[in-house]
Amino acid sequence: MNTKPSLLGGSCIIASVCVGAGMLGLPSAGAGAWTMWSLLAITLTMIVMTISGWMLLEAFKHFDLKVSFNTVTKNMLGDKVNMLNNIAVYFVGGILLYAYITSSGLILQETLNINSKVASILFVAIFSSFVWHSTRAVDRISVVLIAFMVLSFVFGVSGLTLSVDMSVLFDTINQEAEYAPYALAMFPVALTSFGYHHSVASMRAYYGEERRAKYAIFGGTTIALGLYFLWIICIFGNLPRSDFSPIIEQGGNVDALVSALGSVIESEKVAKAINAFSMAAILSSFIGVGLGVFDFLADLFKFEDCKRGRTKTWFVTFIPPLVLSLLFPFGFVTAIGYAGGIATIWTCIIPALLARKSRTMKSGNEGLVVPGGSFILILVFLFGVFIATFHFLAMSGMLPIFTG
């Protein structure tokens, strides 16, 4: 007797794709906006990113269950748009690997008392080998990492929750402080924290239909939103807004955040749990993103699935971000922001264009159709355009930037 996959299982898969190292960038990115505006920005992003995932399902319904994002975009929007989409996918994957390699080196430098560049090289050499070996090896290590991440998160956050100070959480000491102007710069990092769209095709194939995949996506983004709320409240309730100045000066690097938390948390065990969670989140994201980029480049360059072919793919996947990390370690949040700015192409703009194209096709109004008509398509498209604009305005110093 064949039983249908549970919605809870699918929701957890989507949540695990969302909740990774991007989560570690949210406190530093939201320090200017602080609690209420940060939570509002994350909620708005979650709503739009959930709808844009549904738009992909709406477009995918015209194809068989094993179809890829690449094939659908090429078929419906043409080679030029597909090439732009593929470049954006590769850029985001590469910049995320770069951010994870840099941050892991800085954290391991503190833990192992070795040079951060040596630590980064060791990190890539050891953990990229799982990706080189096989998808099954990635699957097994991911299960271990997620279990470890959940345990360390629960233990660390439970300790932080007990020590939340409401005056710190709502910054009541600074009566004249401004928050809203800084919220715009947070959106690119928030968007990266809901970047599950490369898994939409897999969800559809997993359930064999669009309707249940739609509910699983909503369940997954809701779980992620709940975890982000808990994380933001715990960090902002323990670490005063003014204490983010040295973290921001170091580009929002995770080791700086962990170090700052360690100075305000009385329990050494809780501090170690947060440190362990941070490392597990980075490692889990590194392996997950690494596998995605690895498979993408193997398909792009037509490398064979043998030891020699996989070694070529490993080289083009991991060596460029490692070299960039060694040469230009310019900050975790900055890198995540770049990823969010470019990810708008394949998480908002392309899904809206695909859904619009889908509705002009013969069977466009059959099966799953995202409610809201043309208005919702325009809204998601513009959200992507605005977030990309916010990012590049912030990078050029044209948006208010919080310095502590």
Image (cartoon, rainbow, N blue to C red):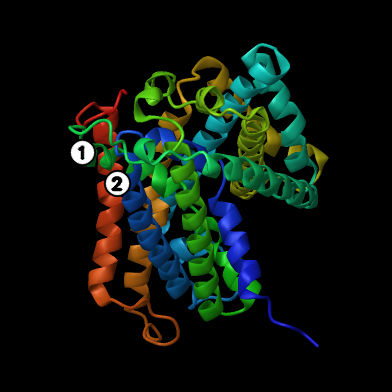
Q: Quadrant of residue 116?
A: top right
Q: Is residue 345 visible?
A: yes
* Location of residue 319 with respect to 83 vertically, above or below: above
- Neighbour class for label 1 at 10 Å: few (<14), some, many (≥20)? some
Q: Amino acid at mark 1?
A: Pro
Residue 148 shown left or right of residue 65 in the figure: right
Q: Earlier in the sequence, mark 2 or mark 1?
A: 2
Badge 2 marks a residue whose secondary structure is helix
* Location of residue 202 with respect to 270 vertically, above or below: below
Q: Quarter of the image containing the N terminus?
A: bottom right
Residue 330 shown left or right of residue 127 in the figure: left
Circle on res. 37: 2
Badge 1 marks a residue whose secondary structure is helix
| Residue drawn at point x = 27 percent, y = 77 percent | 373
Q: How many marks?
A: 2
Closer to viewer: mark 2 or mark 1: 2
- Neighbour class for label 2 at 10 Å: few (<14), some, many (≥20)? many
On the image, the x and y values in percent for residue 134 come to 78, 47
Residue 88 shown left or right of residue 104 in the figure: left
Which is nearer the eye, 199 or 226? 226
| Residue drawn at point x = 53 percent, y = 22 percent | 263
On the image, the x and y values in percent for residue 312 come to 71, 35
* Residue denoted by label 1: 181
Residue 386 shown left or right of residue 135 in the figure: left
On the image, the x and y values in percent for residue 162 come to 54, 43
Q: Amino acid at mark 2?
A: Trp
On the image, the x and y values in percent for residue 233 come to 44, 45
